[in-house]
Amino acid sequence: MDIFELMDIGENSEIEFKKAKNSVPKDLWETYSAMANTNGGTIVLGVEERLGEAERFCVSGINSVEKVLKDFWDTINGNKVNKNILMDRDVEIIDIDSKKVIRIEVPRANYSDKPIFLNGNPYNGTYKRNYEGDYKCSVSEVNSMIRDSSDDNYDSVLIENYDINDLDMETVHRYRNMFSSRNLHHIWIKLSDEEFLMQLGAIARDRNTQKVWVTVAGLLMFGKGLSIREKFPYLNLDYLNMIDSDTDFRYGDRVTIDGNWENNLFNFYMKVINKLVEGLPIPFRLEGIVRVDDTPVNRALREALVNTLIHGNYSIEGTIKVMRFRNRFEFHNPGNLRIPVSDVYSGGISKCRNKNLQKMFRLIGFGENIGSGFPKILKAWYDQKWAEPILEENFRINEVVLKMSMISFVPEVYREKLKLMYGNSLDSLNTDEVKILLAAITEGEISNARVQCILDMHSKDISDLLRSMVNRGLLVEEGFGRGKKYMANEEFCWEDSDSCLDVVGEESKGNNNVEKKVVSLDDLNLNNVRLSRVEEDILNIIINDGFTSTRINSEKLEIPKHISIRACNDLIEKGLIKREGCNRATKYVLVNNNL
């Protein structure tokens, strides 16, 4: 994109403007460090921010551009930063209306080069990018980058004073049984437990003291829960089954650290994988005369779960969290990727954070080690004609999330739902707008970055298109900057606008005159209708105020707009409330307020 397109988008996590009339701005180096340690970005020198103006940014230019450029290269190649990751082609001088600006493209630093820091002190000079700002990294974030920069296996490190007694031998024996059944003639089968664990990399001998200690991988994979929590106080394991839940805040089944099982990674995997694949349709297939109950979808879920465990950063605060919804799966792990997301999608590159854990799972048939695992997930979902899995990095909370939707992305499947939601308005939409609405419906929420994966368009053009769809009431937005999300507007009113306004007018008159005889939920004839907590809260608002809206629910209950819309739609289906008005004038009232 050119400078004007960048100015129109404004500053975000990957765009930064700085005034630089006669010298290199001092805070440029913090932004350089932050972008390099996050996902890269563009810095433009010679563009000034004007607060309160209609056009927020303007080209102010650089007076002595050659001097500023020389100072920049002298500084970046000097002692100011620990490493220069730029090449000549990453920095260019651009003429705009007889004014000169400098455009700097900062790449995402390779994991082996991180952290990129200032003034010779990584613990006081390492930054990351967060929306429109640069923030100084904590000690744990810096240590995490330092560990990740090495190709040595962190999980092979010996933990002094932790020995084989810190391992749960029942877990070890269950693992050995699976290993033996898969590797019938392997020479490790006849080894003692200690010899087997030694070969596996779960324990190792300190060559200086000759003492045998447990490795990081061994403790995480087979350890006793108490021993694991003593060494890794941040470790948290959580599985939530949300299939039968009526909101995104409740669950029907859970596997977590509750004292009922030895909470190591192997046990967590074995408990969770069966719950993930339970009830999935399995096509009838024979190999010879033996029925095969395994499917590419099952294998993709196994791969996703293994990836979550072997790529987790267990030295920082965060949770290994797996969630199963009615129509999607989510896998969360602490830590960021060691390679860009695009390389993960392409496959063929494997930079696992915990190689010993990876090996332990692979030896019992779970997980790949040549970078082919994620492409297999993509292929399994593609063959089912489901929406492409979404892999996201959240640098703000140091988390990686994989979302795997089981909703078909074939346009014909959702054409009817689109017609019901948007009516005749659908006929006036172009192909790109329909694709955006399809993505918003199938995935629940979308972002500018997600739409870039769907449409071959510039980020600026996508921003304009999304803004137009919000203004027309097709989408609702939430958040700001790079964190902004868009949802399908399930309150969209596609009748004639004049008739919609008439309804709103009648509603406002009616609400002023209706005598409220319903004073509590007990006055409603619920007939054993099951209500979620959010639905109860919404009904109470209507009972007290006579009506509610999406905005009122969001403000009073402190819930996202899409949760409010979903709960109101559920109450409509249950026959308790009705919708009056349309678009931003939509209000909800009781079906019968004189019970």
Image (spheres, rainbow, N blue to C red):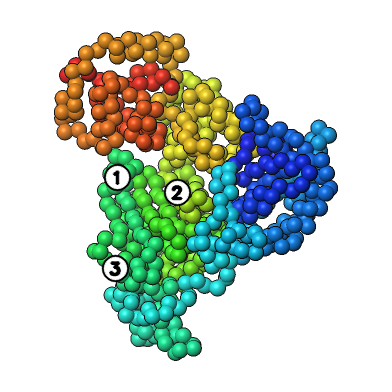
Alpha carbon separation for disc pair 2 and 1: 19 Å
Residue depicted at x 67% and y 63%: 82
Left or right, 51 with reference to 185: right
The answer to which of 101 and 281 lies nearer the viewer is 101
Amino acid type of the residue that numbered disc 3 sits on in the rendered structure: Glu
Q: Is any part of residue 292 visible from this angle?
A: no
Residue depicted at x 40% and y 33%: 561
Q: Is any part of residue 539 visible from this angle?
A: yes
Q: Quadrant of residue 76?
A: bottom right
- Mark 3 sits on what residue? 262
Q: Earlier in the sequence, mark 2 or mark 1?
A: 1
The answer to which of 3 and 525 lies nearer the viewer is 3
Alpha carbon separation for disc pair 3 and 2: 28 Å
- Mark 2 sits on what residue? 403
* Quadrant in which the C terminus is drawn: top left
What label sits on residue 250 in the rendered view?
1
Amino acid type of the residue that numbered disc 2 sits on in the rendered structure: Lys
The answer to which of 415 and 27 lies nearer the viewer is 27
Q: Earlier in the sequence, mark 1 or mark 3?
A: 1
